[in-house]
Image (cartoon, grey):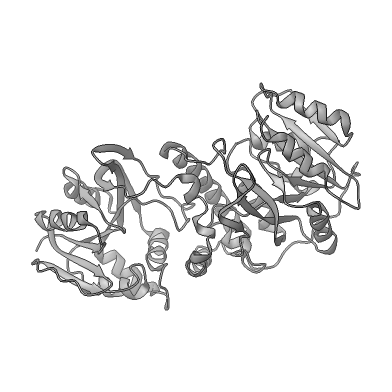
Amino acid sequence: MQPITVVLPHYEHPLWQDTLNQFLDSPQVEEVIVLHKGTYNGLEKRVQVISTNQVFSSETLQQLVNHVKTQFFLFISPPGLIFPGTRMFERLLQGMSMTGAVMIYADYFDQIDNSLTIHPVLDYHIGSVRNEFDFGPFQFYRTSCVRTVIEKSGLPSDIDYAGLYDLQLKLSVSEQLHHIPEPLCRKTVLTDESSGEKHFDYVKAQYRDMQVEYEKVFTDHLKRINAYLEPKFSPVPPDKQEFPVEISVIIPVLNREQTIPDAIKSIVSQKLSVPFNILIIDNHSTDQTPSIINNLAEKDSRIHHIIPEAVDLNIGGCWNEALLSPLCGRYAVQLDSDDLYAHELVLQQIYDEFQNNDYAMIIGSYTMVNFDLKIIPPGLIDHREWTPENGRNNALRINGLGAPRAYRTGIARSILFPNVGYGEDYAMVLAISRLYQIGRIYDSLYYCRRWKDNTDAALPIDKVNKNDRYKDYLRAVEIRTRQALVK
């Protein structure tokens, strides 16, 4: 018997049959299991069929493990249009022999027509708990270890989407998920979807059932590793200092002459029952941004144009400049230099929530718009996956939490932001949520503009990996901190 079974979900595409044939031609493959939603009419020898409507369900996974007779199985992620590279199977078998891993994954090539581009993926560690963590187009499993974990921990019932995610989390607790940093296959790219669009997939309404399952599976994982926090919160400590105003709107900015006027105007139009000001941290802009801010500040004394002495600040560092300024109010509210408040009562709504609840932070909801403020898909992003009972646990699984974000300045000063340009807000939310309750407003308070200069629009893979690597690092540190807190 050959050592490998290939698990290949069926996909209606001319290249799918070529993929199947290449695996059948490999001397290391004993058989191919086709996961099919209907009836597969292929006549190939060494092909077995499992009929399923949900490739990633627990039921499908259990059938699959019961059927595999070989030492290893290769699970191909949908749509499965991949082609093994030179010595792919030899390298996977070597890796299993040398590392003792329970699962191996690898870099790969993206293929568009006849063009190949290397697609590196990240090393897995305790913070790599996103359900969309990119393992690449395949995962190579040691069958005996998978069976042992399933026999020991079982598979959750009624799971249609998160079965494989559940297995990967369980394997990661005591076993090694090993990354081979070499491209071992080619993946046919079917769409040219930008990372900026993919960034918002997890909040789309049609994915809600998936998110519920992912949250359940992930919460169980946190309990297994003693990082789960009960819904018990520390009271917000009283402020020890006086503040010049109740609210400060914070805008870090660098070369945003096209958008900063609209951003500022959306703030000065706010109707608020208490005093507020605007702290614009201008990170040494070289376009017309400074003169635009100065002109508006001359007309409105609430606008403060602050240019830091430091020249090494990123967005997080600019936020710290604002928080530590004697001009900063009791509550610090975010507005990005690209964006706008949705109506003139946004600050009042946030302020009222702070007055009526013991919140250390409040996060609103926003609507995606184009540069001309016309609504674009997915429209309203309200992050209803956040619940008061489990939001701070589920926050470790997802990539974002909403806007605008508003902080009690005293608490934010005690933590401060990391001096980075991506994930600085995520780090602050994780740290605050570890101890304090965070409030949510599900009405749209904010227009998030999508345009060519957004920091997360159509990023190359190296930038995507850099961003994901940093957030996974934050998750790892936070999980370790929470484990210590639980103890």
Residue 487 seen:
no
x%, y% of residue 419? 63, 35
Residue 466, above or below 433: above
Query: Where does residue 238 sit, x and y in percent of width and height?
Result: 86, 54
In the picture, measured across the screen, residue 469 lies left or right of residue 307, that is: left
Q: How many marks?
A: 0
Q: Is residue 256 above or below residue 35?
A: above
Q: Which residue corresponds to the image point at 41% horizontal and 63% vertical from the top-left?
A: 165
Task: Tell me the quarter of the image containing the N terminus.
Answer: bottom left
Pick the residue in front: 335 or 213: 335
Q: Residue at x 30, y 58 (%)?
A: 79
Quadrant for the C terminus in the image: bottom right
Q: Nearer the viewer, residue 423 or 144?
A: 423
Picture layout, residue 287 above or below residue 352: above
Quarter of image, res 379: bottom right
Q: Quadrant of residue 418?
A: top right
Task: Give the percent coordinates (x, y) of residue 441.
Answer: 71, 61
Could you tell me which residue is drawn at 84 percent across and 34 percent down? 303
User: Furthest-bottom residue in view?
Assistant: 157
The answer to whether residue 434 is left or right of residue 57 is: right
| Residue 108 appears in the picture as rendered | yes
Q: Position of residue 327 (x, y in %)?
A: 86, 36
Question: What residue sits 89% from the left and 43% below the top?
Answer: 243
Work out whether residue 159 or residue 144 is closer to the camera in this orientation and state it: 159
